[in-house]
Image (spheres, rainbow, N blue to C red):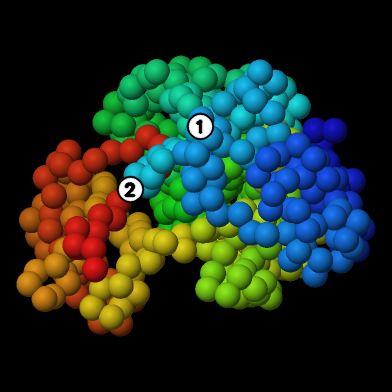
Amino acid sequence: MTDQPFWNPKTELMAREDLRELQLTKLRRVVAWAKARSPHYRRTLAGVEPEQIRTWADIDRIPLLTREEWMTSQDAHPPFGELPVTGPENAIRMHTTSGTSGRTPLRALDSRKDWSWAAEMWCYALWGAGVRPHDIGYVAFGYGSFIGFWGLHNGLEKIGALTIPGGAQTTAQRVHQIHDFGATVVASTPTYALRLASEAEELGIDLVNGPVRTLILSGEPAGSIPETKALIERKWGAHAFDTAGMTEVSTIVMFEPDTPGREIGAAQPIACHVIEDHLLEQVIDPETGREVGYGERGERVCTSFGRSTTPLLRYRTCDLVVKIPHSRSSSGRTWDLYEGGIIGRVDDMKLVRGTNVYPGAIEAIVRGFDGIEEFQVRISRQGERDEIELLVETCATVDAGGWDLLSGRLGVELADAHEGLRFLLRRAATGELPRFELKAKRLTDLRPAR
C-alpha cells in the first residue's frame, strides 16, 4: 500500500458522474439526520424533504447557514446552541474556533465516530504529501481548545507514523526536539514555520541539511501564497504542502498533493483538491448568494457528510476561493480544486483612498524580499485622509544602506500592485513586532467606524 500515491483510490479516482451521485446520496442522508434530531435544522428545514434533493440545483432548497446564526444560537441556548443533535453527554470532545477575529468563539461537539472521521480526512492530505508509516511527525502546536492540528495528530497515528506532540514548549525547545528526535515531517502554521526557522538559525541548527523533508501547513491563508510557501521551503530545505480546514467542520476540507519533480523553494502556483467524497463545496457570489462557475472568485459554502454530532449544511465560510476542474491537476484525482487554495476572506478587504487592499496581496509582495523577519500593516485616518503604514522588522544583517534600498524597492512594488497607493514604510526595532504560533494577525485598521 505504501507504494501507491492515493489514500483511498476508489473515491479519489472515481468518475465524476458517480462522485456526484455519491454526494447527493450522502446529502439526503445528512438532511434526514439533521432534520430529525437538531432543533435548528428541524426549524430551518421544515419545508425540505430529503427525497426532493435529486439534482445539484435542488441543493438550493437548503437554506444557507451563517456564523452569526450559529453565534446567536449559542447565546440564546448556551453553551452549544441548537445545531447539535445531542448534548455533551453523548460527545467525547469539544473544540472552539481560534477567536483571533475578536468575535465569540464557536463551540462544537464531536462523537467518537466524528473524531475518527476527522482523522481520516487528514490522512488524505498526509498521504497525498508523501507521509508514510516510517516517518516521524512533529506537531508544533499548543494543543488547547482551538481545534488546530488535533486531527492531524490523529491522522499521523492512523497512518502509523511515530507522532511527537509539541505542546507546552518554547520555540527553542521545539526546534531542539525536531532536531534531536530526527523528525521528517513537521506540521505548523505558515507563520510559525518561519519563526521556527529563524529560531533554528539563532541556535545554529541547520534545518536545510536536516532530516525534515515535509512540512504540512494549515491555519492561515499564507500557506496559499506562493512567495510565502517558497520562503518556508528555502529555510527548511523541505517541500511544504498547503491544507485548509475549519473548526465548524472539525477537520480539513482541501489539500495540496505532491507533484513529482517539484523544485524546493520555487514560487509555483498552488491548487488544492477538495475532499469531495466527504464534503460538498459550492462557490457563491457573496452579494447575491448564487453559485458561480469555474474560474470565478466567490465564497466557499461547505456541507459536511461526516460530522454527525454537529451537522453542517451549506455553511457560509467567508473564505474566498476560485474553483477549477479536476482536469487542471496532474495528480490523477477526479476531485475539483481550489486554485491558490484559500485566497483571502470576504471580510478581509480594506478600502484605502478608493483602493482595495487585501492582506494576502501585501504578504505576497513582502515575502518576495530577502532580509525581512516580520511585518505589520496599520491603517489609520489622519484628518480627512486615510493612511496605510507598513512596519518592517528586518534581519540583523540588514544595515542602514540595505534598508534604504529594500524599503525603496518594496514601496514601488506595493504602489504598483495597489493602483499607485503610497504605503508609509517604517523600520521596526528588533523584536518590536509580535510573533505568532497560531493564526497571525498582521493588519490592524485603526480608523473609527463610519
Q: Is residue 357 visible?
A: yes
The secondary element bearing badge 2 is classed as: loop
Which badge, 1 or 2, is on the more N-terminal residue? 1
> In x, y percent, where is residue 209?
46, 34
Q: On screen, 21 above or below 413?
A: above
Q: Amino acid at mark 1?
A: Pro
Residue placed most toward the observer, 62 or 160: 62
Quarter placement of the C terminus: bottom left
Tell me the residue that label 2 is attached to: 441
Q: Is residue 183 left or right of residue 171?
A: right
Residue placed most toward the observer, 53 or 79: 79
Q: Is residue 267 visible?
A: no
Q: Is residue 32 left or right of residue 398?
A: right
> In x, y percent, where is residue 409?
22, 70
Q: Residue at x 53, y 63 (%)?
A: 320
> In x, y percent, where is residue 261?
65, 53
The secondary element bearing badge 1 is classed as: loop
Tell me the residue that label 1 is attached to: 78
Q: Quadrant of residue 288?
A: bottom right
Q: Quadrant of residue 335?
A: bottom right
Q: Residue at x 78, y 58 (%)?
A: 47
Q: Is residue 82 left or right of residue 371?
A: right
Q: Are marks 1 and 2 in contact (CB under 8 Å)?
A: no
Q: Residue at x 19, y 63 (%)?
A: 447
Residue placed most toward the observer, 108 or 77: 77
Q: On screen, 441 above or below 207?
A: below
User: Which numbered disc, 1 or 2, marks the residue closer to the eye?
Assistant: 1
Characterize the local packing of mark 1: few (<14), some (14-19) or many (20 or more) Cα atoms within 10 angstroms.
few
Q: On screen, 257 above or below 8?
A: below
Mark pair 1, 2: CA separation: 28 Å
